[in-house]
Image (spheres, rainbow, N blue to C red):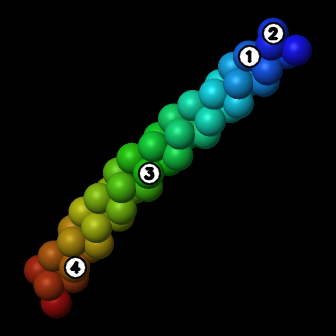
Amino acid sequence: MNKQTSKWKQDFFTIWTGQAVSFITSAIFIEEMKEGFSCIEIRRINYSIRKG
């Protein structure tokens, strides 16, 4: 019984850690994408101003 309980805790911890890492990675990736998009937008606006 005790061994089974520790196995369950280990699995739960492994899954939870995986989810946390995945969430953090996604958050960082989304922030990077936002930065990238804002840079592209700024460049496009500057190009439009220079062209116009």
Q: Nearest to the eye among marks 3 and 4: give it.
A: 3
Q: CA distance from mark 4 to mark 2?
A: 63 Å
Residue neighbourhood size for the residue with mark 3, other residues' Cα within 10 Å, grouped as few (<14), some (14–19), many (≥20): few
Q: Which residue is mark 3?
A: 27
**Residue in the picture at 52% in, 46% down:** 23
SS of the residue at dot 2?
helix
SS of the residue at dot 3?
helix
Q: Which residue is mark 2?
A: 3
Q: Is residue 35 left or right of residue 5?
A: left
Percent x, y for residue 15?
A: 68, 31
**Residue in the picture at 73% in, 16% down:** 6
Q: Amino acid at mark 3?
A: Ala
Figure check: 39 above or below 11? below
Quarter of image, res 50: bottom left
Q: Which residue is mark 1?
A: 6
Q: Amino acid at mark 4?
A: Ile
Which mark identifies residue 45? 4
**Residue 32 shows in the view:** yes
Figure check: 50 above or below 17? below
